[in-house]
Amino acid sequence: KKHKFWETQPVGQFKDVGDTSLPEGPIEPPTPLSEVKQEPYNLPSQYEWTTCDMDSEETCNEVYNLLKNNYVEDDENMFRFNYSKEFLRWALRPPGFYRSWHIGVRAKTSKKLVAFITGVPARIRVRDEVVKMAEINFLCVHKKLRTKRLAPVMIKEVTRRVHLENIWQAAYTAGVVLPTPITTCQYWHRSLNPKKLIDVGFSRLGARMTMNRTIKLYKLPDSPATPGFRKMELCDVPAVTRLLRNYLSQFVVAPDFDESDVEHWLLPTEDVVDSYLVESPETHEITDFCSFYTLPSSILGNQNYSSLKAAYSYYNVSTKTPLLQLMNDTLIVAKLKNFDVFNALDVMHNESVLKELKFGPGDGQLHYYLYNYRTQSALKPSELGLVLL
Ligand SMILES: CCOC(=O)c1cnc2ccc(OC)cc2c1SCCC#N
């Protein structure tokens, strides 16, 4: 039976879609903390819970290797995400993080890490309500244990630990349809290294196109066009926070970033997140901002290449520089940093520039979900101002 587990959870159910009598907001009220289950859920007898301290080099290595070998692949098994250790430490230790929300499952005999799920705290605004949520991510069960129904008990356990911190909502994404997406986004891809993407079989030479003609089609200038375009620095955090908060206020769902959030999520971290801004040469005002994160993928089953260097559009704000020019400068920087591809979702205002910047639509979709929070109706991707890693 499909969605056996999700039909037991406080999430929008398919049967309720379109029922405008149901109000926007929490589906269930908070439970008194004394009534939250104090002890962990039961795992199958040969497995045990473990808390993964990402500060520990050894544990971080175990998590990295579990994900490298068992995490999400595309439908054609051409790629598998290969989140780096620095990226995982960044993604899992934002302001106010809880180590207890970095949950592993070990085999009791071998002590091998066989499954993982995480949460990090976030303040997410839904229309005019700022809600404390957990962002749930990195749910991974070892390929050899996929039929043991571990995912439902792992989801219940991370939910229990989130409840213990008096948080009752969550946000998560999936490539599969579950009850019930608040919106469904499309991936778009901009070739930076077309020869490699063709060699690995992701892209194909267009009709009547030679390889040289294709390389020329995707060629980019060797420096950004916008005067005052520069890397973000620590001293820019207050201005970037103001710029970003104002920009994100227009979307139905968006993070409620403060300066400490901006410092963590958007200050450049080598090989993890890159961020640039436009400082007006005349007024020294910060008028625009763009950022992308680094998420390589293993290339599965190709003789010549083993890794894809992919950049993912993160948060972009254009108030003076046209978004088209700002994003083109981002592509230029990504190419200079030797990325093979620049990926973007059709969220916020991205859709308006993707085609002109020579992005092509991907065949994968990304569904966004809220746990224990109903929205009046599904959002358009352009109403979503939240990028989850
Ligand atoms: C070349 C364009 O495709 C990707 O960059 C890519 C890379 N690795 C993946 C690993 C797992 C995977 O599972 C859905 C997809 C990819 C994709 S396409 C969707 C992500 C984006 N943009």
Image (tube, grey):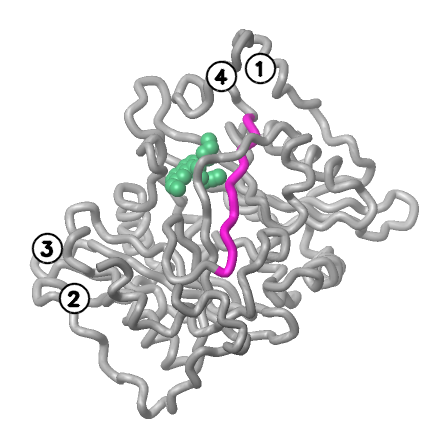
Quarter of the picture containing the N terminus is: bottom left
Decide which of 331, 356 is in the foreground and name it: 356
Mark sitting earlier along the chain (4/3): 3
Task: Label 1, secondary structure: give it.
Answer: helix
Q: Disc 3 and disc 2: Cα gap in Å?
A: 11 Å
Give the number of callouts: 4
Residue occupied by mark 4: 195
The magenta-colored residue range is 182-191
Residue occupied by mark 2: 48
Foreground disc of the pair 4, 3? 4
Instruction: Give the prevailing secondary structure in the magenta stretch.
Output: strand
Which quadrant of the render holds ligand 1?
Answer: top left
Mark sitting earlier along the chain (3/2): 2
Q: Position of residue 345 (x, y in %)?
A: 55, 44
Task: Label 2, secondary structure: give it.
Answer: strand
Quick check: is the Cβ at mark 3 less than 8 Å away from ligand 1?
no
